[in-house]
Amino acid sequence: MTTVESDEKLPHVVWDSTYTAATEATGFMFPPGLTPLECQIAGHPFDGEKRTIGMLVCRRTGYVLKPATKAILGEREIGFYENLKTSQDPITEQLKKFVPHYYGTTELRIFNNRTKFLMLRDITKDMAEPCVMDIKIGYRTWDPLATPEKRKTEELKYAESKRTYGFCITGYQVYSLSTGRLKKYDRDYGKQLGVLGVVQALEDFLNVRSGEPACRQLVSELLTYLYQIERFFNIQKKYRFYSSSLLVAYDARYLRQHCPMYEGRFNFNAQKRMSLKESCIENFSMISPFTYLSNLEEIRPRLRKSASGPVPMPCEQVLQNNLEAKVDRLCRSSPSKFSLLSTHTIKKRNDESAPTSKECKWVKVKMIDFTHVFPGDDYDLDRNYRDGIVTLIQLLSRIKKTDCSH
């Protein structure tokens, strides 16, 4: 049951454009123990002028706080997580393995409004140098309730990448193995990635250097997760996922120290690494049209092998009128078929999906963003999502095989 607190008792996030100290020039003052999530690379950041709310992390618990700022979409995602927590359905039980653990909801007061947050496990916890990429899956990213205007808008976003691969890269951050420098690429960068740019972004994220192969240990760990998700989507017919993402993360420091091909090559000390982290963060939002020309000939042969032509659209196209009508009845009558009462706090359960000793701790892949999840009809697979995963597997497999000598 939700605990209702008065606005005065709620922790406040205060914004004042005149603030300069202890706010990193953002103008925000956060409650004790809460800070903006440093590795957030998609979605809206905290911005006082635009009144946008970003993600937070609780230093005491390690939970990530994701804002549910849009009422219907937020309640739909909360309902999705609540359903996962309580359902005994075999398909739902399998799905739990692929999403961050959910601890319930909490509220903060921001911009003089009560704002609900989902509390989720931080998959980058204990990673010294987290490299993180947000990959939105699907040829189609608009849901059955989208207006014609919304459909057009979504079709134009990341158009070349979605049309060719069935996924798009909405942002990423990566620590260089050789220098320790952190580079961040936002969604404006991702929107400009073409067919070749997607390949180069994946290679950059994997710390592939010119003339050298990728670390097979890293790519193999990523593929292990992706194959499991693919197998799940080869059987599940219960859900349809639209505009949902994969959050891919690995620890660059672990990779630098343990991958055989890098052994002994990068030995700059911890103090130097920390100074680089603090002073050498680069943010990228725009791409020059000539960014990829210098490496075009190097990338093109690899691309021919992985995608010689546009990948055909999946069998699942626009839903039939009768299905849309069914979903419309389900979703307009309440925020979601999966809506349940949210909880203010949830204690850890004995069956919490804690990492096992066999689970890789320095590489993680989780499904995230469930504001546009709709019920399936139990008659067909979610090919829109499944086919995007398959193409991503193919690209990573090609990167893994290219010029590998270790």
Image (cartoon, rainbow, N blue to C red):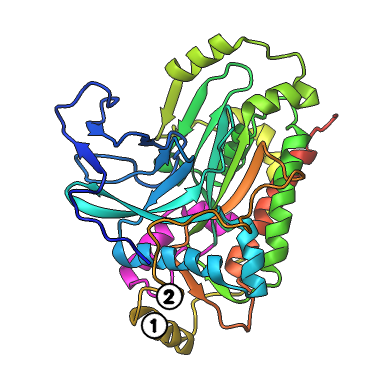
Instruction: Determine whether, in the image, residue 231 is placed left or right of residue 15.
Output: right
Check disc 2 and report its element: helix, strand or loop: loop
Instruction: Determine whether, in the image, residue 286 is placed left or right of residue 382.
Output: left
Instruction: Determine whether, in the image, residue 199 is placed left or right of residue 157.
Output: right
Q: Residue at x 54, y 53 (%)?
A: 348
Crowding near pointer 2: few (<14 within 10 Å), some, many (20+)? many
Q: Residue 25, percent across and down?
A: 25, 25
Of residue 171 and residue 312, the one placed in the foreground of this image is 171
Tell me the residue that label 1 is attached to: 328
Asked which quadrant contains residue 72, the reply is bottom left
Number of the label disc, if any, that sits on residue 343: none
Q: CA distance from mark 1 to mark 2?
A: 8 Å
Which comes before the other along the chain, label 1 or label 2?
A: 2
Q: Residue 28, percent across and down?
A: 24, 34
Work out which quarter of the rendered image holds the N terminus and state it: bottom left
Q: Residue at x 62, y 48 (%)?
A: 365
Of residue 259 and residue 85, the one placed in the foreground of this image is 85
Q: Residue 63, percent across and down?
A: 47, 44
Give amino acid for label 1. Answer: Asp
Q: Residue at x 18, y 26 (%)?
A: 19
Please give the range of residues in magenta. Answer: 139-165
Give amino acid for label 2. Answer: Pro
Q: Residue at x 49, y 40 (%)?
A: 62
Q: Is residue 98 above or below residue 218?
A: below
- The residue lying furthest to the left in this view is 18
- Residue 304 appears in the picture as rendered: no
Q: Residue 97, percent across and down?
A: 65, 58
Tell me the residue that label 2 is attached to: 144
Of residue 317 and residue 311, the one placed in the foreground of this image is 317
Check disc 1 and report its element: helix, strand or loop: helix
Would residue 331 be counted in the magenta stretch? no
